[in-house]
Amino acid sequence: MATSMLTSNSALRIARPVCSVGIVLGVLALGVVPCTGGPKSREGSGANPGTNKAVDHDEMRVRFEKAYAAFHDRIAKDPRIQFSSIGGSEYYERYDEYGALLRLGPGAVPFMIEKIANREGYRYGTSLIPLVERIARIDPGPPHDVIGWWKARAATPAKFEKAYAEWKRARSTEPRLLQIEETVYDDEKRLIKKVIKKTDLGRAFDALRAFGLDSLPHVVEKLREGDGDLIPLFDDLVGGNCPATEGTGQERIASILAWWNEHERDFLLPPVSAAKLKEDKR
């Protein structure tokens, strides 16, 4: 690809492509890890293809309460945890009881939301918030208001369509880059710094990804309409669980849709009403 050069304040800026939508698609077709700037891997994110198909809402609640009690029983009885200055989800991941909660997948998220809303998720200094974010593939950032996110999910379809319209607009520009690396030199052509910058297309891609698992049904619908550029987004949202296939764009889309028909339930979040939350009193 051609390198573009821009001048600003007597400094020479060289913008080098880091990753494009076309490159991502081409690499994924070969079953190789995407290049820098493409979708990030979400290993261990909680989805367990094939395990939730026969689990209804009530049975999932029983499983969750059992796993939740076991986790906090482990925390309460382990002095190494009680008196440790280390906290957070990364610390607790070493324990099987924490992994058991994670493996329950999307079906358990409403019950986690209930615990968090009642502040039960903070018992013994722990929190279920990281589990919700990890399973749902969301990153709301500080203050990590997952309750607000849960309540606002009903508006996701309209918001997704708006974000998708921006994605199409940004995709119409050339070159179709998600990121660029900008190298800045002084008048003596000495390196000052290198900066990775998101393009409009990169920001539009991130906006679609920000909806997490809730965007999957809409992404699948766009794939049915032939938008193969969303394959990397689909792969990211399902955590790489969909086997990579070779072939034309349409053949790959057909393979993805066949896989989705079999595993759809493993990646769908329950409706907002599935979490029994008290009315706000203001």
Image (cartoon, rainbow, N blue to C red):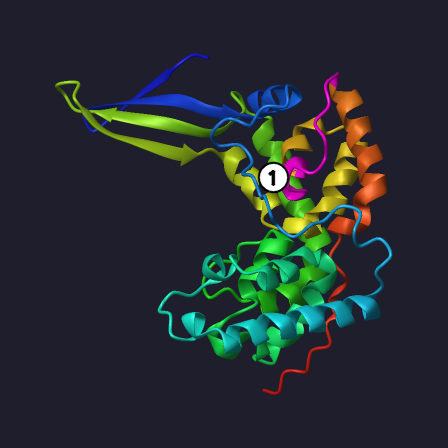
Q: Does the magenta stretch include residue 36?
A: no
Question: Seen from this angle, which residue lies furthest bottom?
Answer: 281
Is residue 175 positioned above or below 178 on the image? above
Q: Where is residue 92 in the image (x, y as percent from the top left)?
A: 50, 62
- Residue at 54% x, 67% y is 145
Range drawn in magenta? 234-248
Residue type at the position of mark 1: Glu
Question: Seen from this angle, which residue lies furthest top?
Answer: 2
Reading the image, the residue beneath label 1 is: 166
- Residue at 68% x, 50% y is 213
Q: Can residue 33 be seen in this view?
A: yes
Q: Position of residue 19 (x, y in %)?
A: 49, 25
How crowded pointer 1 is (Cα within 10 Å; few <14, some 14-19, many 20+) is rated as: some
Is residue 112 positioned above or below 9 on the image? below
Residue 120 falls in image quadrant: bottom right
Most prominent secondary structure in the magenta stretch?
Answer: loop
Question: Seen from this angle, which residue lies furthest left?
Answer: 188
